[in-house]
Image (cartoon, grey):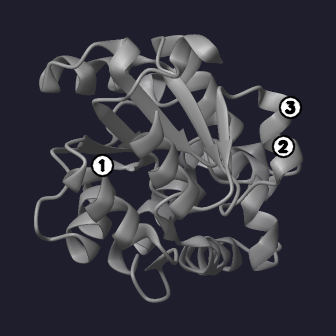
Amino acid sequence: MEAHRQPPALCIFDLDGTLVDSLRDIAEAFNECLAVLGLPTHPVDAYRYMVGEGVPKLCQRAIGATHPHLVEPLAELARRRYRERPLRHTRPYAGIDELLRGLRAAGLRLAVLSNKPHVTTQTVVAHFWPDGIFEHVQGCVEEQLRKPHPHYIEHICRRLDVAAEACWMVGDTPTDVAAARNAGVCSVSVTWGFRTRQDLEEAHPDLIVESPEELLRLVRGS
């Protein structure tokens, strides 16, 4: 952990479960598509452990082992359905706006990296932060390069000309921790998102924070 405690120049944020609580919108969109295909739906809370690794993996988990031939049809339906309505219930978590303003005031550069499809990622970020506070917003374009693959983290660092050792990847799942580790950047796990603190501890991030306020204090005091 100590090797990563130098002050960051760049914070890359995961989106779902980190900046915004989008679980209900995701669950409703996918449940509607499951129903169209004649498959069982799931409680909203069950999606906490389905999301985080891209649409295909979410569809596999939602369907289970019973109808593997319906994974791709569900993915096609769900991408379209969710793209049409990603903002019905989604909201930033309490304290996120203050965190982002505080980080910018401290001179940090900010970016977003999500496994959500790229266009929808841009739609959600532009809706809540239209002022360009994020210098780069990246969703998933190529499934084989989604987190935990380091490609997009490395791409953002190169594009913003920031060394890996000066970058923090902030997220709410073990996938974010693995992506940070693979890219050689500091992994910061947040406990207000979709996974429990125990889930995060088992992934061994460099830092765990309980609130946006704590993260801001860490950056200012590091």
How many circles with numbers are drawn on the protein? 3
Residue shown at the point (77%, 50%) measured from the top left? 61
Image quarter of the N terminus: top right
Q: Residue furthest bottom?
A: 88
Indicate which label's residue lies in the foreground, 1 or 2.
Answer: 2
How far apart are the alpha carbons under marks 1 and 2?
Answer: 27 Å
Indicate which label's residue lies in the foreground, 3 or 1.
Answer: 3
x and y percentages locating residue 109 in the rendered image: 22, 40
State the mark number for residue 202: 3
Determine which residue is flagged by label 2: 199
Amino acid type for the residue under numbered disc 2: Asp
Q: Secondary structure at mark 2?
A: helix
To which quarter of the image does residue 81 belong? bottom left
How far apart are the alpha carbons under marks 2 and 3?
Answer: 5 Å
Determine which residue is flagged by label 1: 118
Q: Residue furthest front?
A: 221
Q: Nearer the viewer, residue 168 or 128?
A: 168
x and y percentages locating residue 93 in the rendered image: 51, 74
Q: Is residue 139 placed above or below 179 in the rendered structure?
A: below
x and y percentages locating residue 124 in the rendered image: 31, 68
